[in-house]
Image (spheres, grey):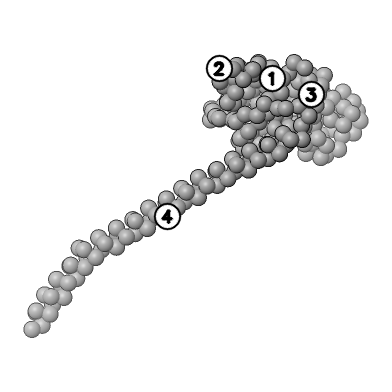
Amino acid sequence: MRSHIVFFGSFFLFFFLFFGLDFLCSLIIKTDQNLSFQNVSEIEYEALKKEYDALMTSENFALTLEEKPIITKVVSHDPYIFFEEVTILKGKYENIEVGDVVYNELGYIGKVVDVKDHHSIVRLFTNRDNTIQVKIQNSYGIFQKDINQFVVKNITSKEPITEGSIVYTSNYSEIPFEMPLAKVTKVETSSIEQTLIVTPLIKVEELNYCYIRKAKI
């Protein structure tokens, strides 16, 4: 009798392990797939919401401008030249020309350097080869990338510059408008000159929409 009990007990244990465990595993996998799908959906939702908010901000900003800007979408960030240039979805057929100025509600982004039929390449202000003439308070200087930070050097005036001051593009440069560019985060003073450590106002990796303004006015 005892042997029969052991036999049937072993049989039911085997049956559970063989079929029940398989069922539990499939249930866990299905639950995990549902969670993965949910996470993907949430990620897609957040991305779309972020883009929508950026578009609304851009359109609201456009209403405050005197001129009617050309609005366009940033369609690609090349990971190998992430801080060097981006592609925008406007080109020759939309009357875009080399030298046109690109900006958004926060300030200066860069200049158009190459134009195709329906897209253009923009060289960003963060490009390591850029030197941009800028204005800070009543002084002028040169904005550039210095290794892993941005600085303003060759300041023309000995007037003290305060932290928190906004750096603008200078209308004496090849950019014919004054546009916000960066904020002064640190002032380094020597017996010869002031050097400003600055933080860009725009995060290049978050660019979605921008405006194009004709350089020739």
Quarter of the image with the C terminus in it: top right
Task: Tell which residue pokes out farthest to the right in this image.
Answer: 159
Residue at x-position 55% and y-position 29%: 76
> Pointer 1: what residue?
100
Q: Are marks 2 and 3 in contact (CB under 8 Å)?
A: no
Mark 3 → mark 1, Cα distance in angstroms: 12 Å
Left or right of residue 77: residue 141: right
Q: Amino acid at mark 3?
A: Phe
The residue closer to the viewer here, 191 or 102, is: 102
Report which residue position mark 4 lands on.
35
Mark 2 or 3, nearer chain start: 2
Question: Please, what is the three-letter code of the amino acid marked with disc 1?
Answer: Asp
Please name the residue shown 62% across and 29% down the image: 72
User: Which numbered disc covers residue 177?
Assistant: 3
The answer to the question of whether label 3 and label 1 lie on touching residues, with beta carbons closer than 8 A, is no
Q: Label 2, on which residue? A: 117
